[in-house]
Image: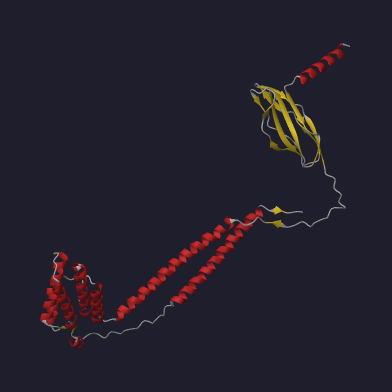
Amino acid sequence: MKKYLLYIALFYSAFLSAQTSPVKAEIDTTNIRIGEQFEYKISVDGTDNIIMPKLELKGIEVIDSLRLDTLKNKLVQKYILTGFDSGAFYIPQQQVFIRNQAHLTDSLLINVATVAIDTTKIQKFPIKGIKGEPYQFDDYKNILFWALAIILIVTSVLYFALKRSDNDEVKTREQLLNPYQEAVRNLKLLDEKLLWQNNKIKQYYSELTDILRNFIERELNVPALETTTSGLIETLSDFNETKSILTDKDTIQSLNKLLQQADLVKFAKSKPLAHEIEADRNVAKHILDNIKPNIEIEESAEIDPVIIVEKPIVKKPSILVRIVAIALILLLAISVGYSLAKVIPMSNSLKTPVTNVE
């Protein structure tokens, strides 16, 4: 009899302790279908120094954890749960700390049922293949960068190729002119610049003497551009005495005065008058007309025979051919870059397939 009374007392004390527990767990339903959501609620008496549990469930998944509410001196924490496997699952006891003391909730049972499907009334569809993700800017940025880089490179090459071609043509035309023709042409160009008329006397005399020195260097094979005025005059005087050139002492003297005048303008800041500048221009033309190499002496001189071997003339492609060739190379490079950039996003999309089953 005492033994039964002891059991009754223990059961009653446990019942009283359960009734007086400050922690309570509830669910709004005990039966759901697969994928259906239900609410799990934990209520705690009091609002101070309370730590809610982090749910650890098996067979049940947490969809959302709602905001903690305070209702009539109680804390209420609600969770949205669901299940994707059929069967009976327990929501185990959860541990809630109230003022650093642990309290356990009751464990609850939830039944997850499958959805009854009448297969005789359902239309069947074949399984569809893998559907790739839609293309975005990141899928095409590689193509864009390749295209811009190739266009920049080809444009630069085309620009310098055409520019060099133009310079080659100018140099070729200049080489076709003999020293006298080149000097006369440069004199006319100098007149068209109107340098001394715009008070650029120093630049005028500098270009004028360069024309004369370049003419003498090409015509007589003398380093006139690097020689001083006195050295150049002395060389021409020696050539005149040996009859190596066809000129006279007056022409050499006129050249000496013109070069000295130019040195005064360039280094001593001398400023000749307008009629003096025009006279120096006429003197320069007179010098060009009266200094020539003595061809008879050069032909009579004994020289060793020289065998001249002409180089084969290689015709350069025209500008149109260059442009077409560069355009074809550009098109080929863009095609290769496009193919490579297209393979990369396709391989990435295959790694994360998305199936579409109706």
Instruction: Examine the rendered structure and indicate whether residue 296 appears above or below residue 328.
Output: below
Q: Quadrant of the N terminus?
A: top right
Task: Residue 139 in the image: state x and y as whole percent.
Answer: 59, 57
Instruction: Examine the rendered structure and indicate whether residue 240 appears above or below residue 347.
Output: below
Residue at image position (82%, 14%) is 9
Location of residue 137 by image quarter: bottom right
**Residue in the foreground of this view, choosing between 261 and 340:** 261
Instruction: Examine the rendered structure and indicate whether residue 316 appears above or below residue 53.
Output: below
Instruction: Examine the rendered structure and indicate whether residue 252 appears above or below residue 74.
Output: below
Location of residue 89 by image quarter: top right
Residue 173 shown left or right of residue 217 in the figure: right
Residue at image position (43%, 78%) is 318
Residue at image position (60%, 56%) is 136
Residue at image position (46%, 76%) is 320
Residue 184 shown left or right of residue 339 in the figure: left
Task: Residue 86 in the image: state x and y as whole percent.
Answer: 81, 40
Spot the residue most to the right. 1
**Residue in the foreground of this view, choosing between 205 and 87:** 205
Task: Residue 19 in the image: state x and y as whole percent.
Answer: 78, 20
Task: Residue 162 in the image: state x and y as whole percent.
Answer: 41, 72
Colouring convention used in this rendered image of the protein? secondary structure
Q: Quadrant of the C terminus?
A: bottom right
